[in-house]
Amino acid sequence: GVVMRSDLSDQPSMASVDEGMLKQAILNLMLNAVQAMTPQAESGESAELILRVERMDDRVHIQVVDTGPGIPVEKQEEIFHPYVSGRKGGTGLGLPTARRIIEEHGGRLQVESELGQGTAFTIDLPADPA
């Protein structure tokens, strides 16, 4: 019930990364987004997952955006702590693992969210100079 869309820049976006590790980080973000939107998708409401990639000067931004319920401001840093989960049965390891992977690549993982509107996780990585 979740529609996935991609928004890829026409400008090449290259970064030196461990492909498997980056894939794991992005997959963690996408799975969290889908799980956050599952109740609304099951109720027939519109649920969208957007994967956006763009180059910003000497950085590459990979954004995972959802139209889910959003994350309260007071929880937005807490969700990156190990074993903190907003989902019954969740391990609370997906976001801390994703953040660690991104930071090991010289990047940052940030969250922006608005209650009732959705959430955007942005991976910010150094771009290859070439």
Image (tube, rainbow, N blue to C red):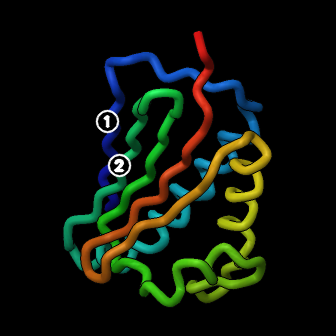
At label 1, which amino acid type do we have?
Asp
The x, y position of residue 82, in whole percent, is: 77, 77
Instruction: Give the residue pinned by disc 1.
Output: 7
* Residue located at (75% from left, 36% from top): 20
Residues 45 and 20: in front is: 20
Q: Residue furthest top?
A: 130
- What is the total number of numbered labels drawn onto the structure image? 2
The x, y position of residue 14, in whole percent, is: 56, 21
Instruction: Give the residue pinned by disc 2.
Output: 50
* Residue located at (44% from left, 52% from top): 64
- As drawn, is 34 to the left or to the right of 46? right
Q: Residue furthest left?
A: 45
When the figure is inspected, residue 5 is found, relative to residue 84, above or below; the finding is: above
The quadrant of the rendering that contains the N terminus is bottom left
Q: Secondary structure at mark 2?
A: strand
Q: Secondary structure at mark 1?
A: strand
At label 2, which amino acid type do we have?
Ile
Question: For residue 41, which quarter of the picture?
Answer: bottom left
* Residue located at (53% from left, 60% from top): 110
When the figure is inspected, residue 33 is found, relative to residue 56, above or below; the finding is: below
The x, y position of residue 48, in whole percent, is: 29, 57
When the figure is inspected, residue 26 is found, relative to residue 85, above or below; the finding is: above
Question: For residue 44, which quarter of the picture?
Answer: bottom left
Residues 31 and 64: in front is: 64
Check whether the beta carbons of the residues at disc 2 and disc 1 lie within 8 A of each other. yes
- As drawn, is 18 to the left or to the right of 62? right
The x, y position of residue 62, in whole percent, is: 48, 42
When the figure is inspected, residue 74 is found, relative to residue 34, above or below; the finding is: below
* Residue located at (76% from left, 57% from top): 100
Say the numbered circle drawn on residue 74: none
Decide which of tag 2 and tag 1 comes sooner along the chain.
Answer: 1
- As drawn, is 114 to the left or to the right of 89? left
